[in-house]
Amino acid sequence: MKHCAAILMLLAMPAFAGWEFSPAIEVGAVKDRQVFHHLESANRKGLAESAGRIALAWEDDRNGEPRCWLALREDKARAFSAPLALGKDECYEPVVQGMGKGRFVAAWEENGAVWARPADSEAAIRLSRQEAAHVTLARADARTLYAAWAELAGKYKRIMLARLTLDAGGLKVGYSVALEDALPVDEQAYPALAVSADGSVTVVWEDRRKKHTMMLAAHGADGRKFTAPYPLIDLPQVRTIDLGAGMGSMRPALAACGPACLVAVWLDKRDFLSGYDVFAAFSNDGGRTFGKNHKVQDSFGDNIAQWHAAVAAAQNGRVVAVWDDERDGTADLWLSDWNGSAFADDAAVAGASGPGVQSDPVIQLDAAGTLHLAWLERTEAGGTRLKYASALWKD
């Protein structure tokens, strides 16, 4: 149902503060072929910025099989570079992390393992020992970053973490640890990862140890030894006839929003009649605890399902969430900003809303306050296009 009343009201009002987006551009275009792109990854980390350069990582089937790609846009350039291949075989769920001075590190899943490499080198290193998937990255400083992924341990996968260093000699693994010593009793998946100013590391992930998918978090003061997992959800997990073992939640995303501030966003089915909603929670102690859960989308989106939630944040406390939903009849991208006590009314993304299908957003907020956004657009021929735009906040 269209927001007719809201649109008429806005037309009668003077200009107001909000994000002003640049015209969208296509990335990694393939001519005369129907191509399907994917922007899925743990923590939705397909987009990164470093010293004004932008990197976008994705998977598509332009070569007839799933392959991972990375494209770069130089500072203020109109177009992205031609795509660079990550890995050598079938590849899934790539992520990219800015490291400062225009450098990036990418990671992905290939041949049942997770790998990483600097964007400016073909020297990839294997991070996992056993079957693994769902890798993600987070920067600690200009030469240090962490990777988290899900790796088989016994019958099920559990969350692993590694400390990596990037120098002139390439990328190296300092150590890798399991977040929990005990073997998992059910699946763990899709970790989201953030590093606080004090160097501590927080991981949030999907966990099925209670026989339904829930959000768990753990904090490592030294990035090596982690606390016992604790729930992100602020409602009791009660078995019911309607919900079974629990209400269900999925696909966490995590970002640092200040020296000791972290924000987690995920899809949540506590209102099971309308499908998944976007929820968020904040930590003000660097990930040792998270507080009250906040619904992110406004009331116009309450009766339909939300998908592909992502979050971007800056050290000054600005937080922006993005997702897609079909409240206006087809999938569009929607943004909401945190105002200090709640998420503001949703705003449709210019160039990524209206007729057609726009979905699967990835997002980055750089230190200068520029918002970077990429997404998929369904083509009339049935394939997809990969689009990118940036935005500045206008008061």
Image: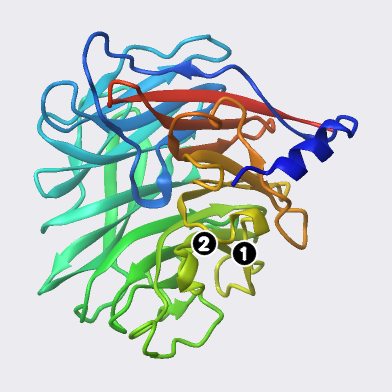
Q: Are marks 1 and 2 in contact (CB under 8 Å)?
A: yes
User: Which amino acid, mark 2?
Assistant: Asp
Q: Nearer the viewer, residue 196 or 302?
A: 302
| Quadrant of the rendered image containing residue 328 | top right
Q: Which residue is mark 2?
A: 277
At x 10%, y 74%, the residue is 154
Residue 79 drawn above or below residue 392: above
At x 32%, y 78%, the residue is 212
Q: Nearer the viewer, residue 388 or 112?
A: 388
Residue 113 drawn above or below residue 351: below
Q: Position of residue 29 (x, y in %)?
A: 33, 14
Compared across the picture, whether 51 is left or right of 205 comes to right
Q: Nearer the viewer, residue 256 or 12?
A: 12
Compared across the picture, whether 178 is left or right of 333 comes to left
Q: Residues within 10 Å of mark 2 (few under 14, many from 20)?
A: many
Q: Nearer the viewer, residue 351 or 284?
A: 351
Of mark 1 and mark 2, the one earlier in the sequence is 2
| Quadrant of the rendered image containing residue 238 | bottom left
In the rendered image, is residue 220 in sight? no
User: Which amino acid, mark 1?
Assistant: Lys
Q: Which mark is residue 295?
A: 1
Scheme of colours in the image: rainbow
| Quadrant of the rendered image containing residue 47 | top left
Q: Position of residue 321 (x, y in %)?
A: 59, 48
At x 71%, y 53%, the residue is 338
Residue 64 drawn above or below residue 175: above
Distance from disc 1 to disc 2, alpha carbons, whole Å, reads 7 Å
Q: Position of residue 365 (x, y in %)?
A: 60, 37
Element under disc 2? strand
Q: Residues within 10 Å of mark 1 (few under 14, many from 20)?
A: some
